[in-house]
């Protein structure tokens, strides 16, 4: 019995001897179809101005959707409202342990209007002041007063901007000065 006459199922002869042959034939058919389809689209694109405009608009929209927003971020959008983002954590104050309302790095990032990973990167690269306090568990935290003050500096220093750059030296200096001032 030859390979082409083998049974594939009840009553149906198999067209290809191996799965690889079947896959190769399917790829070849798909490639031929794509060539034919693309040829038709190219011809239509050349002849039909409305279709051409529609394609260009679609590709621009696709690009905008994939690259994110170039609009201003609104850094520090929740300045003055940091108390709404607080979490209660146990803090060691003197010889006693008390629960206090503080902002973790995740919550501070929400107040500023950025992703927590970005804020952690800013802290590591010294663009943003390190939290001066930590919880009993060792988690770094900001007080509400610090969060509001730093968010205001960012809001005022980066108004209308789409990014915070390492070259924003004045804003970076102002952030560190504000943190020092708040911790006196």
Image (tube, rainbow, N blue to C red):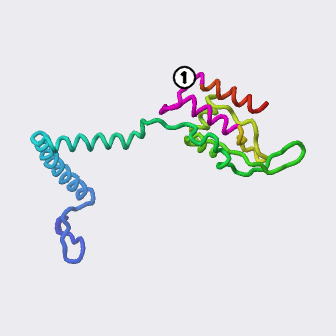
State the residue in front, 113 or 148: 148
- Taking the view exactly as shown, the residue that stands out farthest to the front is 80
Name the spot of residue 150 as percent of width and height, x first: 65, 34
Q: Please, what secondary structure does the residue beneath circle 1 have?
A: loop
Q: In this view of the protein, can residue 24 be seen by the observer? A: yes
Which quadrant holds the C terminus? top right
Residue 152 in magenta stretch = yes
Name the spot of residue 121 as percent of width and height, x first: 59, 35
- Taking the view exactly as shown, the residue that stands out farthest to the bottom is 10
Which quadrant holds the N terminus? bottom left
State the residue in front, 78 or 175: 78
Residue 58 figure quarter: top left
- Taking the view exactly as shown, the residue that stands out farthest to the right is 95
Q: Position of 28 compared to 154: left or right?
A: left
Q: What stretch is highlighted in magenta?
A: 146-170
**Residue at screen point 54% across, 22% down:** 167
According to the image, label 1 marks what residue? 167
Name the spot of residue 41 as percent of width and height, x first: 15, 45
State the residue in front, 5 or 155: 155
**Residue at screen point 64% across, 24% down:** 173
**Residue at screen point 68% across, 45% down:** 104
Label 1: how many Cα within 10 Å (few below 14, some 14–19, many 20+): few
Q: Position of 4 compared to 126: left or right?
A: left
Name the spot of residue 38 as percent of width and height, x first: 16, 45
**Residue at screen point 83% across, 45% down:** 92
State the residue in front, 75 or 117: 75
Residue 178 figure quarter: top right
How many dots with numbers?
1
Q: In this view of the protein, can residue 141 be seen by the observer? A: no
């Amino acid at each position: 019995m030859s390979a082409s006459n083998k049974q594939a199922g009840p009553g149906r002869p198999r067209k290809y001897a191996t799965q690889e042959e079947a896959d190769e034939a399917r790829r070849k058919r798909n490639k031929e179809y794509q060539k034919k389809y693309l040829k038709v689209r190219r011809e239509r694109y050349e002849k039909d101005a409305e279709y051409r405009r529609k394609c260009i608009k679609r590709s621009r929209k696709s690009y905008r959707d994939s690259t994110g927003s170039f609009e201003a971020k609104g850094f520090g959008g929740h300045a003055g409202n940091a108390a709404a983002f607080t979490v209660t954590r146990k803090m060691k104050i003197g010889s006693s342990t008390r629960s206090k309302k503080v902002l973790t790095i995740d919550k501070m990032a929400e107040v500023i209007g950025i992703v927590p990973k970005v804020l952690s990167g800013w802290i590591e690269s010294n663009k943003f002041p390190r939290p001066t306090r930590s919880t009993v568990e060792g988690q770094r935290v900001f007080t509400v007063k610090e969060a509001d003050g730093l968010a205001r500096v960012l809001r005022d220093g980066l108004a209308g901007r789409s990014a915070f750059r390492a070259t924003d030296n004045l804003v970076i200096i102002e952030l560190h000065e504000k943190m020092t001032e708040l911790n006196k």
